[in-house]
Image: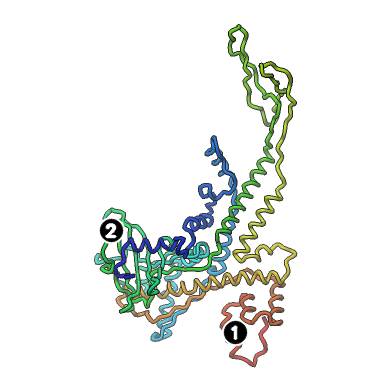
Amino acid sequence: MDYTAITYTDAQKLLNDRFSAKNGKLPDLREMKSRRDFDADEHWQGGNGFIGQLPAGENALERTLTLQRGFSTEPIISEVLDTHVENVLGDEPQISLEHPDASEAELAQTLEILKDWYDRRKTTIVLSDALRGARREHSRVIRCFIPSGNLTGEGRIYAANLKDALDKIWFRSEPVEAGGVVVDEDTAKELGLFLYRMKIDKKDVSLCEYSYVDDASGATNWGTISNNKTGAGAEIADPFALGGHLPIYQLNVKPLIVNSVCQAQRAINLSGTMLTRNNNLAGSRERLAIGVQPPGEYVDKGTDETGATIREFVPEPMRTGPGSFNFLQAQKMFDEDGVAKALANPNLIFTDPVPIDSFVGTSEHWRSVIYSHAKMRHLLMADSATASGKSRIEARKEFQSSLNQSKEAIDPAGAWLIETALRVAAEFMGKPGKFENLRAKFGASVSTVELTPEENAQIREDYKAGLIDLQTALELRQIKNVAEVIERIRMNPTAPPPTV
């Protein structure tokens, strides 16, 4: 595809095709939004989040609203994502810069300015939101953007120094349906796209921000096209020396929250709602009267053609509550001629609540399904007195592996963000290409919960027995900078064997 002639319609189609059943590159959009709602503690979802029987027939809406008021939720999905992201990006990441032509002093000064900008922009929150979204929906978009208020009348941006230039640059985490990076199947060439709306001359206009690397110059063409423009977009695209980067990044990682996890969350909510209903029943027991005439009185309704008085029974509400007393009698049974022949056998039935074991057991089962899929079985063992040290270590390794998978995804994203910010800043300083050869290293400080003495002992035993290597043992012990520790050991071969 010729990216120089991209139109808004082309961009819209390329982004929408990622959700088609034919391509299958992203989850169904409706399911993706449902996962997002669960994470935002919106479990009802217009009734779709409740898998029990919804009221039907007369007054169905009123009874559904009553059911919604008693709808009980337990936000396991959001807790899983909270725990996972916190253990990947909860601590300050390690950031360093390398440049073949810069002195250590220059790099140190650049890094100081960069970290100040990084902290003021709360960039870790942006990366955390992106990782959370990707772990929830498979993909999330990180976008570099420049607020329009920073533009001059000529549509340009000028900065006197690096700090001033970085202050004009922002990054956001965006939903993947709004943009992303698509790849041409024939050329494997990447195209960054982002759809948005803004007011231009007091009119709402749909716009597409697009970017791609020019094969001839190596520059990144970064431009905007509206849905009203039918010609080529290259006329309003500017070249940026970004070292092959696009100003948009699509973070892809295997999701923790899949359809089966959402179904388990719905089952937990159903159990909680039924438990609440059962509790309500225990405090307000339902009564069923069979063959009993309700309280009331006979009222004269005039006379019939023979002059006989017509009397009609008008029921009254049953009195309930402290101190109330009702006189009830058996209901009369009439023959086909309307003559009372006998009295019914009166009976009062009180509905008792059921034991809560089924509700609690069901919730525990589905909770374990969610934790197991999220590689957090160690949380299920926290209060278990029967789980062995070996099983706890295995569960911890699963969790560590899942965190490392996120680290492998977020580290390149963090490096891209830093390099892109510096290279865009160089453009604003009038020094394009100044940081084109600069390389950023970004390292998320992955951590897990504190190990028990039994777990530490099990790691040592496994290492001594040769069941795990030194790197795995150090990672399980949550040692920081494992690679540096192993390198120091390698450089000093005469030292005694390391104690894990």
Q: Name the residue under label 1.
A: 486
- As shown in the figure, which amino acid type bears the numbered disc 1? Ile
**71 relative position to 176: left or right:** right
Q: Residue furthest top?
A: 307
Rendered position, 125 above or below 199: below
Q: Which of 495 and 310 is in front in this view?
A: 310
Q: Residue furthest bottom?
A: 494
Task: State the image quarter where residue 348 is shown.
Answer: top right
Rendered position, 345 above or below 461: above
Q: Which residue is drawn at 58% across and 11% down?
A: 302
Q: Residue at x 70, y 48 (%)?
A: 356
Rendered position, 297 above or below 58: above
**125 relative position to 71: left or right:** left
Counting residues from the start of the chain, the first of labels 2 and 1 encountered is 2
**287 relative position to 216: left or right:** right
| Mark whose residue sits in front, 2 or 1 | 2
Q: How crowded is mark 2: few (under 14 residues within 10 Å), some or many (20 or more)?
A: few
Residue 33, percent from left and from top: 48, 56
Q: Residues within 10 Å of mark 1 (few under 14, many from 20)?
A: some
**382 relative position to 188: left or right:** right
Q: Residue at x 57, y 82 (%)?
A: 483
State the quadrant of the C terminus: bottom right
- As shown in the figure, which amino acid type bears the numbered disc 2? Asn
Task: State the image quarter where residue 70 is shown.
Answer: top right
Residue 193, percent from left and from top: 37, 66
| Mark seen at residue 228 | 2
